[in-house]
Amino acid sequence: MESSHKRRKLSPDRVQPPTPTNDEEPTDFKLAILASMHPDRSQDVLLDYLLAYGGSVEKVSDALSAPAKGNLTRKRNAINGYQSSLASFAPTKEGVIPSVKPLTKKGRTLHLYSPEDVENHTPCSIIHNFLPTEVADALLQELLGEAPTFKRDKFQMFERAVESPHTVRLYVDSYSEIEEQNAQYTYNGGLVGNIGKTPTQLLKASALVQDTVNKEAQRRISHFQPNGEKLKFQSPDEWRPNASFVNCYNGGQESVGWHSDHLTYLGPRAIIGSLSLGVARQFRVRKIVPQVDVSAGNEQGQIAIHLPHNSLLVMHAEMQEAWKHSIAPAKAIDPHPVAGNQRINVTYPAVLRCVQKQSASRSHYFWQCHAGFAVGQTSCGWFAWAEFDEDGKPPWADGYKGNANIPASVANGSSSVKRTPRLMNSRPAEAFGGAM
Ligand SMILES: O=C(O)CCC(=O)C(=O)O
Ligand SMILES: [Fe+2]
């Protein structure tokens, strides 16, 4: 989640830490320096800036200290407008992701309703009326019954523990998975406890979600991804969700802030299925823009995808590294006949196994000590480049196709790093090619 957008000028009497220009300085060291100079910025925002400015702490700091003119301004929800389709304004060619030029003026939001607009303007696709009506209703009833067991998720922003303004619970399909994974899953930075066994209706729905997400992912590859091919690092295997995060938003004020789903447990180029039930809400997406020249108009607005009851959103492989998403607070909502003011969301990731191991080979992804993002812990500052083969497999996975030189400590699982690592990518969104 991002912090306040107030600018804070460095006062001349404030002691400034050194600003290294040496590219070999570890990223977390640069982040620590930037955090001390810009304490009003979240670590995610500082990382975005660092990527955009090629790793230069000085340039980032200059940009952050510049007058606010041209910076993205965020507005709370306006009343939803109506718009049937943008298709007539944006014809598309197969294999090419259409570029969204000045979709929005500064601080404005483009509202997308139709499936064709969503897939043409974002790395997502949406299917309305996804489940048979009775199945959707039974699932909604079941999850509303579970909702009182959900907890507010806590995560750490620098020294402050922040409560997410909605509730969540993780479900897995078997008790052995619960034991195996209890201490391992992380959700937006915090370790997840309170894991439940997937209840009956949710299990039924998961099978349908799996089938549809695989079809949608194939369609995305052939119609939108460059040359009709899967992206580098994207897994060619069937997508199989093995857990689900169930979120509950009780009233329009409940929300989730800007984030990408953490790569640590998902691996690179993750695909995520996301089922919405109950009250319709807006899913906001925005590209992680290298803010090289925001004041010259190189800024992108937000896009709001409308998520009605019983819709399945698929976030495709282009999404997590290059875009952020959020559920914006809503000034007004239409109560749902069964759910009242509540919205239930089921987020299906395909979780990576063996997330603790790391490779020290240099690639575009890196592992970073995760502790700074979890409540009550501080980062030990550990950093290592991460290695994946073309299909997104790490060196320790069966069928790994690369030739990484794996250090013994990693190969035999005895890494000296005791804390949970966090997987990040070190490239600006543009470097991945799939972004608009
Ligand atoms: O509620 C939603 O639609 C999104 C939830 C989400 O982004 C998450 O669980 O990571
Ligand atoms: Fe998310």
Image (spheres, rainbow, N blue to C red):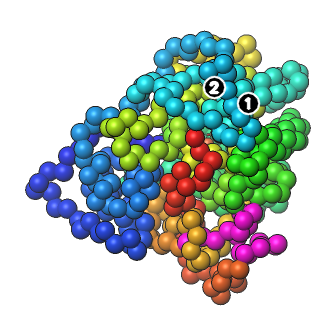
Q: Which mark is residue 90?
A: 2
Residue at (57% x, 65% y) in the render? 364
SS majority, magenta: loop
The residue lying toward the viewer, choosing from 93 and 8, is 93
- The answer to whether one can see residue 192 in this image is yes
Residue, x 20% and y 46% (percent of image)? 9
Residue 271 in percent (x, y) is at: 72, 48
Residue 319 at x, y percent in the picture? 63, 45
Q: Residue at x 53, y 50 (%)?
A: 430
Rendering quarter of residue 86: top right
Amino acid on which the number 2 mark rests in the picture:
Ala
User: From the viewer's perspective, is 329 left or right of 198?
Assistant: left
**Mark 2: is the Cβ under 8 angstroms from ligand 1?**
no
Looking at the image, is mark 2 or mark 1 nearer the viewer?
2
Say what amino acid the circle numbered 1 marks: Ile
Region in magenta: 385-402
Question: Residue at the location (73% across, 42% down)?
Answer: 95
